[in-house]
Image: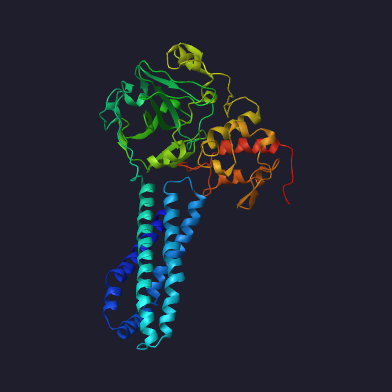
Amino acid sequence: MTPFVTLFAALGCALIAGIFLGFSNFVMPALARLEPAQGMRAMQSINRAVLNRWFLGVLLGTALVCVGLALSALRTWVEPGAWLRFVGSCLYLVGTIFVTKRYHLPRNEALARLPAGSEEAERFWRVYVADWSMWNHVRGAAACVASALLILALLAVSGCSHPLRPIAPPGSNAPVEYLSELGIFEGELARQLPRNGFVAYEVNAPLFSDGARKRRFVYVPRGSRIQTSSDRWQLPVGSYLVKTFSFPRDLRNPAGGERLIETRFLVRTEDGFTPSTYVWNDAQTDARASSGDLDVPVSWVDEHGVPRRLVFHVPSASQCAACHAGRALGFRSRQLDHVAEYADGSHEQIAHFSALGLIDRPPPAHVLLSDPSGGAPLAARARSYLDANCSHCHGEGGSAERTELHWDLEHTAANQLPICRPTRQVEGRDRVLVPGHPEQSEFLARMRSSDPRIHMPRGPIRLADETGISLLSAWIGSLPPQNCKP
């Protein structure tokens, strides 16, 4: 709904800008050439005629829509184009509506009270034309710029303002259109067998992605090393992070194959990470570079034999940037330190990286995330889930850092939880976390919500993670109950 409303506001701003441009360009100059009495009578007539439902409907209707857009942008600040919607809406409200009310209406009312032809009226008219015209330039320019910003907001949502471009194979500067041309996988592409130099890896606590299965690979240029640390690792320029999203066709029968949706890339450059995605064709033989921001229908049979359907959203570059904020989210000591299965048996994943020459040293002491579906204590699994799914926004460097509501592992110890913290009401819940009462906790209501303006986590996710909600509900239910009512 927001793109349609934004389009309506952009058109409204453009119409108003055109009207005011006409006044600035020829109406007021023409009136200024007339005898003062004639000019005054003409302007008085215009001021009466302009108070019609069509002009006022566009002027004030656009203002009401801009109020809604500005408030919506504040609630969804991390979404693509939100700041453009906010600035554009506020510019129209202040630069056009406020200026009209503050500077034009009082002058129009004063003009209406003066009889044309009097000496006082002639003196007033000369000042009126100059001042009225100057402030008309201001409100016309404000409406024009507001329209441009709202159009840019629409482009940001569509992915056109930050298109995902094809990337080049490792060691090359020539982007290629098809995944098969990147030379990442050996043999049949759908089997996802990495060629020499690309290393498969897994994380301890994966980000929920509407139930999609994910395969991850990393590539480091020959002679380079990843710099490890107690937290985030620094990949050298020329590194590739690769992730393929897929859905099994029948959860009861793994041999039944899967539907590959997209293969995403983060390529490390001198300026940070460049995102790209390649969307798989229906034949599952290759994937083609895409600008993203598209929906892919997916169907499968769940573990109970029930047919399921989903529209999986492939994000645009701006959506990728909003979440990643220049970081590789899963490439951290807390996520990579675990035992993994390889062709020759089980090995510590970090030791495996070291044996392959991918890292400069074993990382120093660090915190560790638990598998949310594993056998660790309930609190450890719940806090790990929050760290993996929420802290990229609600954490250091995240888009929601200013809320001071942090969900990383370091801030979810019992003495640091946002217990009884007041918040904006969501489905009747106005406390972030109520110990012993998951049904009263606002953050769980956000996770369950189907409203994209409310749902957490933000991003391309469309479904509520029922498994994650069940885990967090059990954890909140295990805490000593408290009454948060004032």
Q: How many marks?
A: 0
State left or right for residue 32 relative to residue 2: left
Judge whether residue 450 can be spotted in this image. Answer: yes
Residue at the spot 47% in from the left edge and 41% down from the top edge: 461
Screen quadrant of the N terminus: bottom left
Judge whether residue 262 can be spotted in this image. Answer: no
State left or right for residue 472 relative to residue 269: right
Q: Please state the horizontal and vertical placement of residue 198, each as a whole percent of the image.
A: 38, 20
Q: Nearer the viewer, residue 435 or 146?
A: 146
Q: Quadrant of residue 177?
A: top left
Q: Is residue 293 above or below residue 226?
A: below
Q: Please state the horizontal and vertical placement of residue 219, each as a whole percent of the image.
A: 38, 22
Q: Please state the horizontal and vertical placement of residue 16, each as a whole percent of the image.
A: 36, 66
Q: Is residue 173 above or below residue 358?
A: below
Q: How is the image coloured?
A: rainbow
State left or right for residue 363 relative to residue 376: left
Q: Please state the horizontal and vertical placement of residue 75, each as a whole percent of the image.
A: 52, 51
Q: Nearer the viewer, residue 398 or 377?
A: 398
Q: Nearer the viewer, residue 285 or 169?
A: 169
Q: Nearer the viewer, residue 89 or 210?
A: 89
State left or right for residue 189 relative to residue 470: left
